[in-house]
Image (cartoon, rainbow, N blue to C red):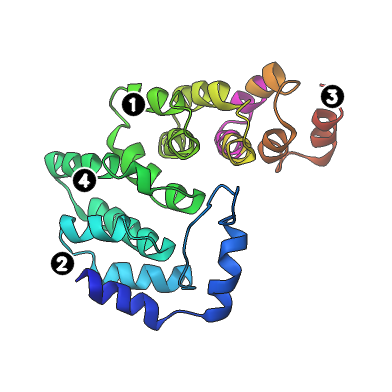
């Protein structure tokens, strides 16, 4: 089935997109996606393929997809895993899929791969459980694992639970990479969408030392006057 999925992706390949994506995902030497390969398949097409095959594909075949050198194969594999996880009701089966996910972290190696899978799987599974895993990922020193830690909290934020998201944001807010600044700012904004005062309290304490990108993401939906007050240090 893996070969069938890869062929389906190749059949939908767009040469112009395949040429564009290495620059978009910084796959050039020294970029965060260095060495990645692209077929040039749109995300909606990848979703359609994942929905077509996720019920029948084995975990062994999913592993082959997620470990594939082509970016779109990895994303299609992760989408399939998310669909399978969402259709699974058993806690024990969820645990098997979570272990599978954690065993493939080395291949979840770009922001879209992280953002399309971690909160739906890890965030959901650990919602009512201890969050030690996420602090270990945050302390790993590895960009994608740290982004997984931060973005997984999106699930808890949507449930109205902010404490771990705020603690992870505080831990990661001064990360050297702007992809983490964006992740931290995004999660803070999502908290603010649900409880403005909680985000304000965090920002008042930290905004002077936050990277500009994180702050801009966090205050993106603020009233313009308040946004300018933060940007100009008047709070």
- In which quadrant will I find the C terminus? top right
Chain-order first, disc 2 or disc 3: 2
Where are the magenta residues, as a range?
186-201
The nearer-to-camera label among 2 and 3 is 2
Magenta part mainly helix, strand or loop?
A: helix
- For the point 34% across and 42% down, the residue is 105
Q: Distance between the residues labelled 1 and 3?
A: 35 Å
Crowd rating for badge 4 (residues with CA inside 10 Å; few <14, some 14–19, many 20+) = many
Foreground of the two, 36 or 49 = 36
Which residue position is annotated with label 4? 97
Residue identified by numbered label 2: 56
Gap between marks 2 and 4, in whole Å?
15 Å
| Residue at screen point 32% across, 32% down | 127
Where disc 4 sits, the SS reads helix
Q: Earlier in the sequence, mark 2 or mark 4?
A: 2
In the image, farthest residue toward the bottom:
11
C-alpha gap between disc 1 and disc 2 = 30 Å
Residue identified by numbered label 1: 133
Viewer-nearest of discs 1 and 3? 1
Earlier in the chain: of badge 4 and badge 3, it is 4
């Amino acid at each position: 089935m893996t070969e069938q999925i890869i062929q389906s992706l190749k059949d939908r390949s767009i040469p112009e997109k395949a040429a564009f994506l290495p620059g978009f995902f910084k796959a050039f030497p020294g970029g965060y996606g260095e060495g990645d390969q692209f077929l040039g398949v749109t995300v909606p097409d990848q979703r359609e393929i994942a929905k077509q095959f996720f019920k029948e594909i084995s975990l062994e075949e999913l592993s082959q997809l997620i470990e594939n050198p082509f970016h779109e194969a990895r994303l299609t594999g992760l989408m399939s895993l998310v669909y399978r996880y969402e259709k699974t009701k058993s806690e024990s089966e969820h645990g098997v899929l979570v272990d599978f996910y954690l065993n493939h972290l080395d291949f979840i190696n770009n922001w879209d791969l992280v953002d399309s899978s971690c909160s739906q799987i890890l965030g959901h599974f650990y919602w009512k459980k201890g969050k030690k895993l996420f602090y270990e990922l945050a302390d790993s020193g590895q960009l994608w694992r740290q982004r997984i830690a931060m973005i997984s909290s999106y699930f808890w934020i949507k449930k109205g639970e902010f404490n771990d998201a705020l603690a992870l944001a505080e831990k990661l807010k001064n990360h050297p990479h702007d992809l983490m600044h964006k992740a931290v700012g995004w999660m803070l904004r999502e908290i603010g969408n649900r409880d403005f005062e909680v985000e304000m309290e965090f920002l008042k304490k930290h905004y002077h030392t936050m990277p500009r990108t994180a702050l801009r993401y966090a205050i993106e939906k603020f009233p313009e006057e308040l946004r300018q007050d933060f940007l100009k240090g008047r709070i």
